[in-house]
Amino acid sequence: MEDYTLFLIKPDSTVKNHIGAILKIIEEHGFVIKEMKMFRMDRKFADRFYEIHKGKDFYDNLIKFMTSGRTVATVLYRKNAINELRKVIGKTDYHETKPETIRRIYGETITRNAVHASDSPENAKEEILKVFPYFKFKE
Ligand code: ATP
Ligand code: MG
């Protein structure tokens, strides 16, 4: 289901009061916010969310960062949401990304890169259900 994706506003953005500015960009690009909540990830949740990266050299830093403050999680809907959102956020490393992307505007480093977006329909479904277990996908 490529029309739904999980979008996270990471702790570097929430601590700098960039939630509203980032959501404004999202809505301007035609995404509909279907679910939203703000929470602080604990170690257990972060380990589960990032289990695909376990064992990578940046893993400990990533978990430390993601548990350092509040995250805003949303389910976004639009046609071809997964691909369209990856374009709007830009690449993992904000240096390499186009000037108008969220990570170039708000990212600080490759780890503190402002936002997360699902990268495939399979991962989007899994990630959405990790944060919003009751979410109903409409075909
Ligand atoms: P996200 O999954 O957060 O949307 P992404 O898909 O662009 O980002 P992934 O490869 O899934 O990137 O990595 C997940 C997160 O781990 C990145 O967003 C970043 O915060 C961190 N990360 C990835 N690669 C590196 C790296 N080489 N060095 C440091 N941190 C990294
Ligand atoms: Mg990823």
Image (cartoon, rainbow, N blue to C red):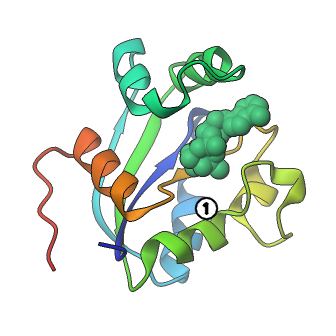
The C terminus sits in image quarter: bottom left
Q: Would residue 112 be visible to someone looking at this image?
A: no
Residue placed most toward the observer, 111 or 52: 52
Q: Is residue 56 left or right of residue 5?
A: right
Q: Which x, y percent locates residue 81? A: 44, 75
Q: Is residue 7 left or right of residue 112?
A: left
Q: Which x, y percent locates residue 61? A: 67, 18
> How dense is the environment of label 1, judged by Cα within 10 Å: few (below 14), some, or many (20 and up)?
few
Disc 1 element: helix
The image shows residue 109, relative to residue 137, as above or below, that is above
Q: Which x, y percent locates residue 99? A: 86, 69
Please tell me which residue is depicted at 14% across the width and 75% down the height of the picture.
Answer: 138
Residue placed most toward the observer, 24 or 116: 116
Q: Which x, y percent locates residue 23? A: 51, 63
The image shows residue 121, relative to residue 38, as above or below, that is below
Residue type at the position of mark 1: Ala
Q: Looking at the image, how many numbered discs can be counted on the residues?
A: 1
Instruction: Tell me the residue that label 1 is attached to.
Output: 21
Residue placed most toward the observer, 23 or 118: 118
